[in-house]
Amino acid sequence: MASNSLTIRDNRTGKEVELPIIEGSEGPGVVDISNFNKDFKLFTLDPGFRSTASCRSAITFIDGDAGVLLYRGYPIEQLAEQSSFLEVSHLLMYGELPSPNQCGHYRALVSNHTMVHEQLLNFYRGFRRDAHPMAITVGVVGALSSFYHDSLDINNPRHRDISAIRLVAKVPTIAALAYKYSVGQPFVYPQNKLGYVENFMHMLFAVPCEEYEVSPVRARALEQVMILHADHEQNASTSTVRLAGSSGANPFAAVSAGIGALWGPAHGGANEAVLKMLTQIGDVSRIPDYIRRAKDHDDPFRLMGFGHRVYKNYDPRARILRKAAYDVLRDAGREDDPLFKVALELERIALEDDYFIQKKLYPNVDFYSGLILSAMGIPTNMFTVMFAVSRTVGWISQWLEMMNEEDQSIGRPRQLYTGHARRDYVPMKDR
Ligand code: CMC
């Protein structure tokens, strides 16, 4: 219940209304404007949702000024250091870290669903070999809804749970198949004796002609990348999943919509854009020129991997990945990697530059994740797909949370209409 309020006065009529302020468990509270239109016959306008909370959620908390990220209350640094992706996935979906028994059960459940229907493989063959793996992933994840009719009743909690597990289990398989298709290698089936991340690497990199051994250093780095990307409150793709889900669409369709939203370079596509940018810069001597371009309003170039809608401080995920990037490059014998050198120097220069300091533009999660993925042998066009695999857990956790709410309603924003006022049709001969 609201313990405080904000009084709004309509200067046109003199009418005053008290709007309840609702406090959350951390961070700024919200002003409840759900009756605003009834009270004032006005809508509120907030393009880009800069001041608008779209839902209540108990999953992830971000303090962008302090650079804090918590999953269900646990600091991201502790989870990245000590936890596993499956454990984090259980935490996000069910609210608590699993006990040893629960962990075993959850692992077995997910492992049981890693294979995809054999018929699904035909979808891949319909794509051109040079199709972007994100295009394939959007399509194939959406297609899951045509295979699992037994779990599509969104009003049945059992169906919701099993669909959620199916997504967590199958999206790595779908992503790996997209990769294999794009490089012309045979599809590799999941190996359930392997851990979640190791199995994903196996499906990506194993070939039938030789034994594939998962490097523990790389597996740990990928595990960290995946933990750090697992959820991030109401970002564009998560909001898309919720909006699509709010219409009653099945979770496979909703997550497919989220994958589409993730694709853009302002969101998940930034990791791909970072590596392209570092390659384009190529040498530390060219950095000042790119910094100058990033600051020029007339130049569309932006420093990819820098800036964030919420973080006005160093993204805590970037800090962790900076170290992980170093570990992986050392493991690959590439400590002197020229792109890593460019990245470190670019960061150093940007962090000392007035433009970036004043606008509070710091490296975000994507600045270093691409370097790690690249050192692992993952091609640039797969980066956003890797992000989608990790974020599937967040999307489905947020969808489950929304579906469990009592007061559900379709997400339906309003608008400020700026078009023509009413006018009459003009017959063709009179135009
Ligand atoms: N390089 C240069 N200038 C920038 C950058 C950048 N990367 N990011 C923001 N600015 C400037 C921007 O031009 C604006 O300047 P002004 O006030 O003079 O007009 C000011 O900083 C505020 O930027 P904004 O566009 O209002 O910020 P936003 O909250 O709308 O956008 C962002 C956030 C992440 C889309 C943006 O910072 C950006 O495009 N960054 C590069 C892409 C990127 O790295 N995206 C990954 C985000 S993290 C992963 C994820 O969440 O998916």
Image (spheres, rainbow, N blue to C red):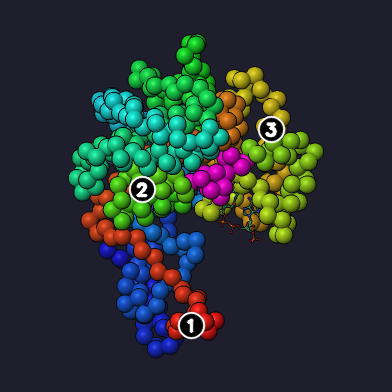
The residue beneath circle 3 is: 339
Q: Which residue: 22% across, 38% down?
A: 150
Q: Which residue is mark 2?
A: 254
Q: Amino acid at mark 2?
A: Ala
In the rendered structure, which disc, 3 or 1, sits on the residue that comes first in sequence? Answer: 3
Residue furthest to the right in view is: 285
> Which of these two is toward me, 52 or 236?
236
Residue type of the residue flagged with mark 1: Val
Disc 2 to disc 1, C-alpha distance: 41 Å
- The secondary structure type at the circle numbered 1 is loop
Q: Is residue 283 visible?
A: yes
Point out residue 322 in the picture as x, y percentages from the top left corner: 59, 34
Q: Residue at x 50, y 61 (%)?
A: 48
Q: Residue at x 38, y 22 (%)?
A: 190
Q: Which residue is mark 1?
A: 426
Q: Position of residue 257 (x, y in %)?
A: 41, 48
Whether 267 is among the magenta residues is yes
Residue 46, magenta (yes or no): no
Q: Amino acid at mark 3?
A: Leu
* Left or right of 307 on screen, residue 339: right
- Of residues 256 and 7, the one nearer the viewer is 256
Of callouts 2 and 1, the N-terminal one: 2
- Look at the numbered disc 2 and give the secondary structure of its residue: helix
